[in-house]
Image (cartoon, grey):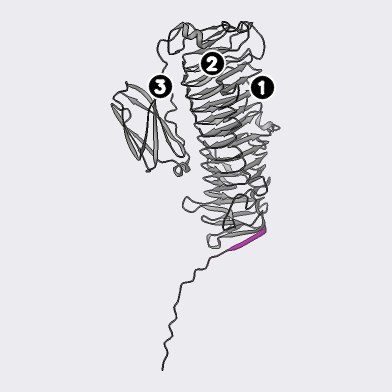
């Protein structure tokens, strides 16, 4: 009898795995076919050698192990095939492995005159997660300048990126859920670079703060003591205890523009800086809750150059809360130089500082605060605007010019509080709109000599009969991070201009809330919808209106619509 024997042939899947450790002393490529690469021991790319990592490669690290770059790292993924640096544990958590370290001999990134990457160490479309076990950072940089673009750095047990005596460029990246700061610069502006650019990133949920600059270092004549920091088009969301501590030293130039600061909390300020010249422009500060203020500046030396300038303009401050006695939403100090500070075209509405001020200002007697074309509406505080005693004495110099503003804050005890002592200049706040022309009302909401004889006098005549239109070329604000599509949907608002209605349409089906404001910042409309909605505005007069869209991730977009 013949016996039939049936063999069942099953396909066999073989996964490649490559263990790495020790020196990489020749040009080496980690290929997709060799992935995953398991860093079983500390691994060092020697000076003069290049490690190239192909798209889609996964690099896993054993506990406390690190990859050090003394030579060059080319880790360039694609949107569809990202490179991942991660834990070798099946259930990963923060601090499972150490770091990626760029040393002082690392080949720094080079760019052409228009800012395009040419060569040098780069991480592009890379994910770095669950590092930071040695308490420094997931990525640690010393005196070198790699380039990071379209990267996700998350769940570090320390900082996301820590850099010492270096500058580098990071753009279009997510830095989130780190137990230290998202980005931490110490002894910055070192070497041949005099600039730091941080743009188009999302800095989210970091419990040691968003971005921090400290330990300034200025011993490099090639910069001619003119250092430049630009922080543009980033999202700072849900960081604590601060969102951004910007450079704090003489001869620094700071630009903070077109960023969104939302839902940040804690004991620090949302934005703090102390520099020689600054421009804070076209940002949104929405629903932050901090005890240190939304903007806190304490400039305290006399090194300001002839070209120094100070501007806070075209920003939105809405729904922020500051706790603590005599704390301010915006506090500006300018000591020891004669450069004017300009605060203009800002919408400041529905903020709360119950035991303090919405805005407080103090300066030397040779600096003029130029406060014009702002809308202070619906805020809650002891004082909407307070002028603090100047640093210096003098009875003839005028250091406040405040005109063409809207001040309508029935929940504030005072609209304007003059804390400048008698013997210093009297203050003039004429040609502003106070919601009324009643002198009895104004005498009650302006605090000066007539309330306390030790203060100087406030002159408020003539008055404006109508509210000032606060418009800005910054609308609509656009945060252009390429990665933002992961967090926020695409928004279409049409027609614009409109007659009696306009439609808002989103690319996803999540719940979204639209809030509509008039040109002085008063909320007129709120509606929650899914995917799309049409707003009927027959009851509204022709004019300019501003909208704000929010979902569970925060503010999606703001913009301007025109009814005609």
Residue designated by label 2: 370
What are the residue bounds of the magenta stretch?
A: 14-22
Report the residue marked by disc 1. 300
Kindly identify the residue that appears in the image at 56 percent across and 60 percent down. Answer: 36
| Tag in front: 1 or 3 | 3
Specify the quadrant that holds the C terminus.
Answer: top left
Q: Image quarter for residue 331?
A: top right
Image coordinates of residue 173 in percent, x first then y, are 52, 43
Marks 1/3: CA–CA distance: 36 Å
Find disc 3 in the rendering and name its residue: 519
Q: Nearer the viewer, mark 2 or mark 3?
A: 3
Sort mark 1 into few (<14), some (14-19) or many (20+) by Cα contacts within 10 Å: some
Residue 115 versus residue 187: which sits nearer the camera? 187
Residue 143 relative to residue 200: left or right = right
In this view, which residue lies farthest toward the bottom? 1
Q: Does the magenta stretch include residue 17?
A: yes
Location of residue 245 with respect to 337 vertically, above or below: below
Please tell me which residue lies in front, 27 or 294: 294
Q: Where is residue 537 in the image (x, y as percent from the top left)?
A: 31, 26
Please tell me in which quadrant of the rendered image residue 24 appears: bottom right
Where does the image place residue 3, in percent across and percent down from the top left? 42, 89
> Which of the marked residues, 1 or 2, is nearer the chain's N terminus?
1
The residue shown at (58%, 9%) is 398
Q: Report crowding for label 2: few under 14, some 14 to 19, many 20 or more residues within 10 A (C-alpha).
A: some
Mark 1 lies on a secondary structure that is loop
Q: Which of marks 2 and 3 is nearer the N terminus?
A: 2
Could you tell me how far apart the alpha carbons at marks 2 and 3 are, in whole angstroms?
A: 21 Å
3D distance between C-alphas at marks 1 and 2: 19 Å
């Amino acid at each position: 009898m013949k016996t039939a024997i049936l063999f069942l042939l099953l396909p066999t899947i073989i996964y490649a795995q490559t263990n790495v450790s020790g020196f990489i002393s020749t040009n080496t490529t980690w290929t997709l076919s060799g992935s995953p690469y398991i860093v079983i021991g500390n691994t060092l790319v020697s000076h003069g050698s290049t490690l190239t990592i192909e798209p889609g490669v996964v690099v896993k690290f054993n506990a406390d192990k690190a990859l050090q770059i003394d030579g060059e790292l080319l880790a360039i993924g694609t949107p569809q095939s990202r490179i991942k640096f991660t834990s070798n544990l099946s259930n990963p958590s923060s601090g499972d492995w150490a770091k990626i370290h760029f040393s002082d001999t690392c080949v720094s990134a080079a760019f052409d005159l228009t800012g395009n990457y040419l060569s040098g160490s780069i991480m592009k479309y890379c994910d770095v997660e669950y590092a930071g076990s040695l308490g420094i950072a997931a990525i640690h940089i010393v005196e070198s300048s790699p380039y990071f673009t379209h990267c996700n750095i998350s769940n570090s047990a320390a900082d996301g990126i820590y850099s010492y005596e270096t500058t580098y460029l990071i753009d279009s990246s997510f830095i989130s859920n780190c137990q230290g700061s998202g980005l931490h610069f110490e002894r910055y502006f070192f070497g041949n670079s005099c600039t730091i650019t941080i743009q188009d990133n999302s800095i989210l949920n970091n419990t040691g703060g968003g971005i921090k600059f400290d330990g300034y270092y200025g011993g490099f004549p090639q910069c001619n003591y003119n250092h430049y920091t630009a922080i543009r088009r980033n999202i700072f969301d849900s960081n604590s205890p601060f969102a951004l501590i910007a450079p704090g030293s003489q001869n620094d130039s700071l630009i903070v523009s077109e960023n969104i600061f939302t839902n940040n909390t804690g004991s620090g300020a949302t934005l703090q800086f102390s520099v020689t010249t600054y421009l804070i422009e076209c940002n949104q500060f929405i629903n932050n809750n901090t005890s240190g203020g939304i903007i806190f500046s304490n400039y305290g030396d006399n090194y300001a150059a002839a070209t120094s300038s100070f501007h806070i303009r075209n920003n939105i401050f809405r729904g922020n809360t500051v706790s603590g006695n005599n704390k301010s939403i915006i506090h500006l100090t300018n000591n020891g130089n004669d450069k004017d500070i300009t605060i203009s075209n800002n919408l400041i509405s529905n903020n709360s500082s119950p035991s303090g001020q919405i805005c407080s200002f103090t300066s030397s007697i040779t600096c003029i605060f130029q406060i014009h074309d702002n809308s202070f509406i619906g805020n809650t505080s002891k004082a909407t605007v307070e002028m603090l005693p100047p640093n210096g004495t003098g009875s003839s110099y005028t250091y406040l010019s405040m005109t063409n503003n809207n001040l309508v804050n029935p929940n504030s005890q005072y609209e304007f509080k003059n804390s400048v002592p008698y013997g210093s200049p009297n203050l003039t706040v004429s040609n502003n709109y106070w919601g009324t022309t009643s002198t009895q009302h104004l005498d009650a909401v302006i605090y000066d000599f007539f309330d306390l004889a030790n203060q100087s006098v406030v002159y408020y005549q003539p008055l404006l009969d109508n509210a000032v239109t606060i418009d800005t070329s910054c609308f609509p604000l656009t945060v252009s991070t390429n990665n933002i599509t992961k967090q926020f949907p695409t928004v279409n608002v049409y027609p614009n201009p409109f007659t009696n209605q306009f439609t808002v349409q989103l690319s996803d089906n999540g719940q979204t809330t639209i809030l509509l404001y008039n040109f002085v910042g008063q909320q007129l409309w709120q509606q929650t919808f899914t995917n799309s909605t049409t707003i009927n505005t027959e009851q509204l007069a022709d004019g300019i209106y501003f909208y704000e869209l929010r979902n569970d991730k925060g503010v999606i977009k703001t913009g301007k619509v025109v009814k005609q």
